[in-house]
Image: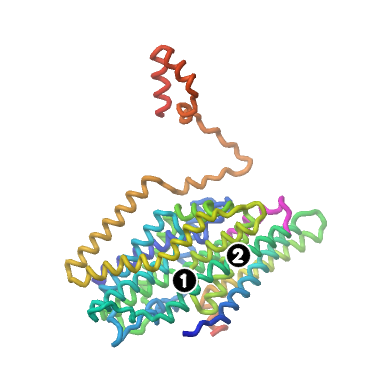
Amino acid sequence: MVALVIVLALLFDFTNGFHDTANAMATPIATGALKPKTAVLLAAVLNFVGAFLSTEVAKTISGGLINEGEAGVVFGPELIFAGLVGAILWNLFTWLLGLPSSSSHALFGGLIGAAVVGASLNAGSIDFAIINGGVFVTKILIPAALAPLTAGVVAFIATKIAFAITRKRERDGFKRGQIFTSSLVSLAHGTNDAQKTMGVITLALIAANMQEAGTGPSILVIAGCALAIAAGTYSGGWRIIKTLGKGITDVEPAQGFAAEAATTATILASSTVGFALSTTQVASGSVIGTGLGRKGASVRWRTAGRIAAGWVITIPAAAIVSGIAAFAVSSGFWGIIGVAVAAAAAILGIFLYSRRSKVDHRSFHQPEPGVFVAPKPRRAKKPKRAPKPLQVKAKQQPKKSSKKKSKKGKK
Amino acid sequence: MTIAWGDFLTVIVASLVAASLLVTLFSLGLRFGDGTAPWRKTASVAMFVLCGLLVAVGIFLIVPALHSAVLG
């Protein structure tokens, strides 16, 4: 059971990595400051390094939010397992939709759902008392509302400043700056997000009496989490990068720099004061703010609205999925097997479905200015474009030529 | 349940100041870099150096091993 939890936790870490590559790397990729492959490699390395830099936050994942001890539930590996299932499935689902939703919220939602169901089964009635409402509001809800707003305002002002000071021909220089600011975001992300998984694994180990309570994560756990998040980052959540880098607004290098600066500043300021803002929400807010800050740039509010809706339902949705999982798990061994099989099937299904409309690093091809771009062969367009009278003519021509044409069209 | 409004305000102000400073410095660096007068080059480099310092502060804040000794 513990092994299963660890595998799932690492899997969650992986989805977390590829979900959040976009936070740091969407704008540099969109402006062409970094080539897509280089960008994800840089982000992966920095995430890996970042995971080793800090282990202090790892325990806060369980601390406070869920009332443990005599009054609460015993948060056993089974419930952690159920919580992780919900978090992973929700993360993959939002990735499929290309929504930059918060991985941390998915994890919190999953754990909350599992805890509520676990407590309710113990008490025999629906029991929300297990959730520490005050902590939930101050540590999760308010920051979630405030993070994108703050980042948006900061990015807006930073964009105004950048455009006021520089002249148009100088603005390409921002591309180089973007490399540094986006690296900072990646590093900060690594130090924060790998922690959460370390916390979960350590929690499971402690719950299974394989590790003494009150100790930090072991070096093996740290290394495993660092690897998982780096691998996830490198595999690149191209769908979300596309949404964030190109879907909300068209980003110029100066805007990208301003947005990244705002993201970094907001994350650092808040983590120094002591609450964890969602990197994803900060980054999305920055992109919207920078879109508003440039004259002539338009923000696609439909996309922004979709993203915001995704944020609102992340916690309840993950909670419901893991609540169901927790219910099934409580029925014993076969329940656990059933949930594992169902989760594997769902993950496989999402991957298969995602292949229908592939988005990968080639979707961001940006020709360097001055590089000759070969014109695309036109054969694909021909059959569509041909006006009707022409087709009639073609029909009148001898059969052989028309056959050739149709062949060409297929190619 | 107490909500630390003061902390939120601190976050907003601090990130606003930091981001604006970084963008201003970098922009000025680019602006000064565009010209032929000899002083411009120096000013531009100075701006970028200040930018680098600001980034160093950022790394200092990210890595707990560095700042835990100072901030506690």
Q: Is residue A53 left or right of residue A334?
A: right
Q: Is residue A39 left or right of residue B42?
A: left
Determine the image quadrant of residue A126: bottom left
In this view, A256 is above or below A184: above
Pinpoint residue A148: horizontal percent, then vertical percent.
54, 66
- Rounded to the nearest angstrom, the CA distance separating label 2 from label 1 is 18 Å
Helix, strand or loop for disc 1: helix
Determine the image quadrant of residue A270: bottom right
- Amino acid type at circle 2 is Ala
Pinpoint residue A109: horizontal percent, then vertical percent.
37, 70
Q: Quadrant of the C terminus of chain A?
A: top left
Q: Residue at x 51, y 58 (%)?
A: A304
Helix, strand or loop for disc 2: helix
Q: Residue at x 51, y 69 (%)?
A: A188
Task: Tell which subunit mark 1 falls on.
Answer: A
Pinpoint residue B27: horizontal percent, then vertical percent.
70, 61
Residue A76 in sight: no
Boundaries of the magenta span: A165-180
In the rendering, which numbered label is found on residue A30?
none
Residue assigned mark 1: A192
Question: Callout 1: few (<14), some (14-19), or many (20+) C-alpha neighbours within 10 Å?
Answer: many
- Amino acid type at circle 1 is Asn
**Marks 2 and 1 belong to one chain:** yes
In this view, A271 is above or below A395: below
Dominant secondary structure of the residues highlighted in magenta in the image: helix
Magenta segment: does it hold A131?
Answer: no
Residue assigned mark 2: A261
The disc, 2 or 1, on the residue closer to the chain's N-terminal end is: 1
* Front one among A9 and A379: A379
Q: Residue at x 49, y 54 (%)?
A: A243
